[in-house]
Image (tube, helix red, strand yellow):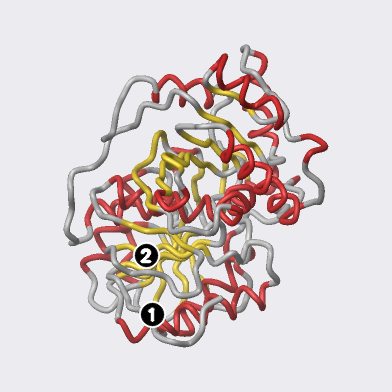
């Protein structure tokens, strides 16, 4: 990853532990008119106000994740960024405690952590995370094959590597000393209050949370803005689901049950010609497990793109997205906006791909693919 050489620092640096999360953050800022770039490169470009780095730490050990995030933070610190945002998973997956600790250790200040994402049913009450009113440790996320969630108490999930305390929006003034301040939140107004406080504060520059809090900060931060882009017309699209989460599996099944073709790799060209949109059925064409399987699936998708013209790819799952982008040469990615909450639209001009549409495995309604197809047939963003 990153050397200790100082990176030319834009005003906002965001770190995410997987690529779908990084693209969500970039889309929040881009949708607010602030240009962003997403990369996993060792020497990231910084010619846009918002630089989002995919740290690729979701599946590392806690110690490895700490070292990687600390190295990036140390490289950025001399540039005195206006805001450092650590994107966290909305269901507490990953090495959240060690990565927040790395930022607090380097910047030696308070970090305001807002784990709620009310629009997606994630709320925080008395320091506990709920998904649609159910403690996260009692939901399907407890059965995640790679990152099972066993704890709903956020302080316990963070661990004792960094001092963490719970607050609500009425006690934001207590955010002073170094450490992590976990904000209760059940509405967007809680997040807006936190964004107003943080951006008005002297010296506080550390924030963390899912994309919802980043979106509220993007609305208010004082940076140059341009008119937001609309949506493209997508007539030909391949859906690639590499997530094993039951939400994504259900979304793919729903589309197939409603007549969507699901061809193997050799049948994609014909399915696209006849239907426009199709879901890849990789099956035995892809071997391996976990990250290795995602890399192998990326190679299959690259071969498809070499022979089948597509307006867009829709990809479910951070590892799968990273595997595809890696197969395309790890080009910089330019977020455009969200299509719907939790679904980011980006462009990869260096890879010759018009649109990349991504979401995490556990997000979205059962009919999300039909909704995306309907939306993208109506509007144009050029």
The answer for how far apart the CA atoms under marks 1 and 2 are is 11 Å
Secondary structure at numbered mark 2: strand
Front position in the image: 97 or 260: 260
Label 1: which secondary element: loop
Q: Around disc 2, counting alpha carbons within 10 Å, would you say few (fewer than 14), some (14 to 19), or many (20 or more)? A: many
**Is 75 displayed left or right of 319 in the figure?**
left
In percent of width and height, residue 178 lies at 42, 81
Nearer the observer, 275 or 157: 275
Q: Position of residue 354 (x, y in %)?
A: 41, 40
> Residue placed at 45% from the left, 51% from the top?
23
Residue 171, image x and y in percent? 34, 64
How busy is the neighbourhood of tag 1: few (under 14 within 10 Å), some, or many (20 plus)? many
User: Is 38 or 149 nearer to us in this picture?
Assistant: 38
Residue at figure coordinates x 34%, y 20% from the top left: 378
Question: Percent from the top left, x then y, of residue 250?
Answer: 67, 27
Q: Residue at x 64, y 33 (%)?
A: 247
Looking at the rendered image, the quarter that the C terminus falls into is top left
Above/below status of 74 relative to 331: below
- Asked if the residues shown at circle 1 and circle 2 are in contact, with their CB atoms under 8 angstroms apart, the answer is yes
Q: Is residue 220 left or right of residue 212?
A: left
Is residue 232 toward the left or the right of residue 127 in the image?
left
Q: Quadrant of residue 57?
A: bottom right
Q: Quadrant of residue 285?
A: top right
Residue linked to disc 2 = 51
N-term mark: 1 or 2: 1
Relative to 185, say whether 104 is above or below: below
Q: Residue furthest front?
A: 307
Q: Quadrant of the N terminus?
A: bottom right
- Residue drawn at x 55%, y 78% as measured from the top left: 162
Residue that mark 1 sits on: 7
């Amino acid at each position: 990853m990153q050397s200790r050489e100082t990176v030319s620092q834009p005003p906002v640096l965001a770190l995410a532990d997987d690529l779908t999360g990084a693209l969500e953050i970039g889309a929040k800022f881009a949708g607010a008119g602030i240009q962003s770039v997403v990369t996993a490169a060792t020497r990231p470009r910084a010619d846009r106000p918002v630089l989002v780095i995919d740290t690729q730490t979701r599946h590392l050990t806690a110690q490895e994740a700490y070292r990687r995030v600390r190295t990036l933070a140390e490289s950025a610190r001399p540039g005195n960024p206006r805001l450092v945002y650590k994107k966290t998973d909305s269901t507490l997956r990953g090495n959240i405690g060690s990565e927040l600790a790395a930022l607090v250790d380097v910047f030696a200040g308070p970090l305001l952590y807002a784990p709620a994402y009310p629009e997606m049913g994630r709320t925080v009450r008395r320091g506990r995370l709920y998904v649609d009113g159910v403690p996260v440790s009692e939901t399907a996320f407890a059965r995640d094959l790679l990152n099972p969630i066993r704890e709903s108490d956020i302080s316990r999930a963070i661990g004792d590597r960094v001092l963490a305390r719970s607050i609500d929006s009425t006690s934001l003034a207590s955010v002073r000393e170094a450490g992590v301040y976990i904000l209760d939140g059940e509405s967007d107004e809680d997040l807006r209050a936190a964004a107003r406080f943080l951006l008005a504060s002297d010296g506080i520059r550390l924030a963390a949370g899912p994309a919802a809090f980043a979106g509220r900060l993007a609305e208010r931060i004082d940076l140059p803005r341009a008119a937001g882009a609309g949506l493209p017309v997508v007539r030909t699209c391949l859906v690639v689901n590499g997530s094993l989460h039951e939400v994504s599996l259900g979304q793919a099944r729903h589309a197939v049950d409603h007549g969507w073709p699901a061809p193997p790799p050799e049948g994609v060209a014909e399915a696209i010609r006849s239907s426009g949109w199709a879901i890849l059925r990789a099956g035995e064409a892809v071997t391996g497990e976990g990250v290795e399987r995602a890399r192998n699936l990326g190679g299959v998708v690259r071969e498809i793109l070499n022979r089948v013209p597509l307006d867009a790819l829709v990809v479910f799952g951070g590892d799968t997205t990273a595997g595809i982008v890696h197969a395309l040469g790890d080009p910089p990615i330019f977020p455009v906006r969200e299509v719907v909450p939790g679904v980011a639209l980006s462009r990869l001009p260096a890879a010759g791909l018009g649109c990349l549409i991504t979401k995490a495995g556990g997000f979205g309604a059962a009919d999300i693919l039909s909704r995306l197809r309907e939306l993208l047939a109506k509007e144009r963003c050029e």
